[in-house]
Image: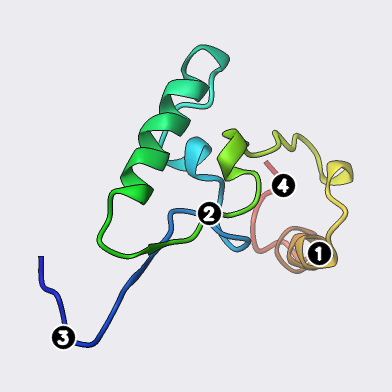
Amino acid sequence: MTVLLGKWNAFFLDNHDNSRAVSHFGDNRPQWREHSAKALVTLILSQHATPFIYQGSELGMTNYPFKKMDDFDDIEVKGFWHDYVKTGKVNAE
């Protein structure tokens, strides 16, 4: 590991722009969620850097399983949907 003199890193696995760490790096099935969350928090806290814990990660929170467009209440998601699906750039499936 390279340590820059006078510098200090930040370390995070998830944030508001990315999926939840347990869903992305771990296994969010009920029988494995707790083990995955504990392993990931051990990784975060053992780095030689300042850890950033995204709210909900301390609880092992996972991604919400959105199934259809009506589940979303986000203007950006609806805008992408309109831009890509309604204009025929991609298939709705």
Q: Which residue lies furthest to the left in this view?
A: 1
Question: Seen in the image, is 59 located left or right of residue 4?
Answer: right
Residue 9 image point, x, y percent: 32, 73
Q: Which of marks 1 and 2 is in front?
A: 2
Is disc 2 placed on a helix, strand or loop?
Answer: loop
Is disc 1 placed on a helix, strand or loop?
Answer: helix
Residues at discs 3 and 4 in contact (Cβ within 8 Å):
no
Q: Residue at point 10% right, 72% down?
A: 2
Q: Marks 4 and 1, how far apart in space? A: 10 Å
Q: Marks 1 and 2, how far apart in space? A: 33 Å
Q: Quadrant of the C terminus?
A: top right
Q: Mark 1 points at which residue?
A: 82
Q: Name the residue under label 4.
A: 92
Q: Earlier in the sequence, mark 2 or mark 4?
A: 2
Q: Residue furthest front?
A: 6
Q: Which amino acid does label 1 sit on?
A: His
Residues at discs 1 and 2 in contact (Cβ within 8 Å):
no
